[in-house]
Amino acid sequence: MENAPKAQNAPRDPPAYGPVPSASSNDGPPAAGPQSLDGVSGFMGMRWESAEEIRLTIRPELIGAGGLLSGVATYALVDYCMGSTLWVHTTDDEHIATLNISINYIQTAIEGEIVCTTELDRRNRSNAVLRSEVRHEDGRLLVTAIGSYAIFPARRPRVSAR
C-alpha cells in the first residue's frame, strides 16, 4: 500500500528541507546551506541530519561581543530541533508553537561544529514536552534544554463571500 492516500490524522512525513534563496554579498549572511528550512535557519547555517538532529558550523557571525558562541545561536538551534522533532508527530490538521524553553548553558565554544539532538518525552492532544542537548564535535556538552509546545488545530483558509 505504498501509494495509498494518507489518513487525515496520520503523522506527517518529515518536512522537505530545501535551499533558501542566496543572499547577495551586500545582504550580510552567507547563502543558506543545502538543508535550511527558512531564512532564519539559513542565516544560522543549520543542517538537518534528521528531524531529531541538526548541525551547525560555528562561524564569525555567530560569535558574540565577548568572543564566544552567542547564546542566541544555541537557543535557536534547540528551538528548531525541538520543533522539527515534534512536527513529524503531528497531522496535517495540527500546528505547533513554542510555549517555553528552559536552557542551561554549561560550556561554550568558539570554533568547530555543534550538533543538537532532541527527544520527544510526551505528546498529548494539546501540548508536548521535549528535551535537547547541544554538543561540540569533540563531545563536550554545551547546552541542555527542556521545552514545551502547544499543539492546536490548523487554521482553515477563509472563503470570500463575494
Image (cartoon, rainbow, N blue to C red):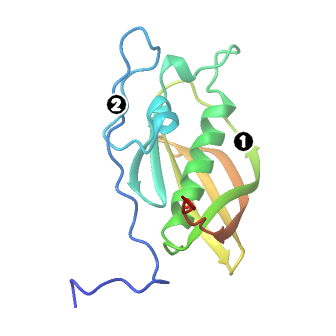
- Residue 57 quadrant: top left
Dot 1 falls on a residue whose secondary structure is: loop
Give amino acid for label 1.
Answer: Ile
Residue 142 x, y percent position in the rendering: 63, 42
User: Toward the viewer: 157 or 95?
Assistant: 157
Which sits earlier in the primary sequence, circle 2 or circle 1? 2
For the C terminus, the image quarter is: bottom right
Dot 2 falls on a residue whose secondary structure is: loop
Give amino acid for label 2.
Answer: Pro
Which residue bears the numbered disc 2?
21
How busy is the neighbourhood of tag 1: few (under 14 within 10 Å), some, or many (20 plus)? few
Foreground: disc 2 or disc 1: 2
Image mark for residue 106: 1
- Reply above or below: 158 against 63: below
Residue 131 x, y percent position in the rendering: 66, 62
* Distance Cα–Cα, label 2 vs label 1: 35 Å
Which residue appears farthest toward the front when viewing the image? 162
Residue 30 x, y percent position in the rendering: 39, 21
For image coordinates 46% across by 78% down, the residue present is 11
For image coordinates 51% across by 75% down, the residue present is 91
Left or right for 135, reference 57: right
For image coordinates 65% across by 73% down, the residue present is 121
- Residue 151 quadrant: bottom right
Image mark for residue 48: none
Residue 105 x, y percent position in the rendering: 73, 40
For the N terminus, the image quarter is: bottom left
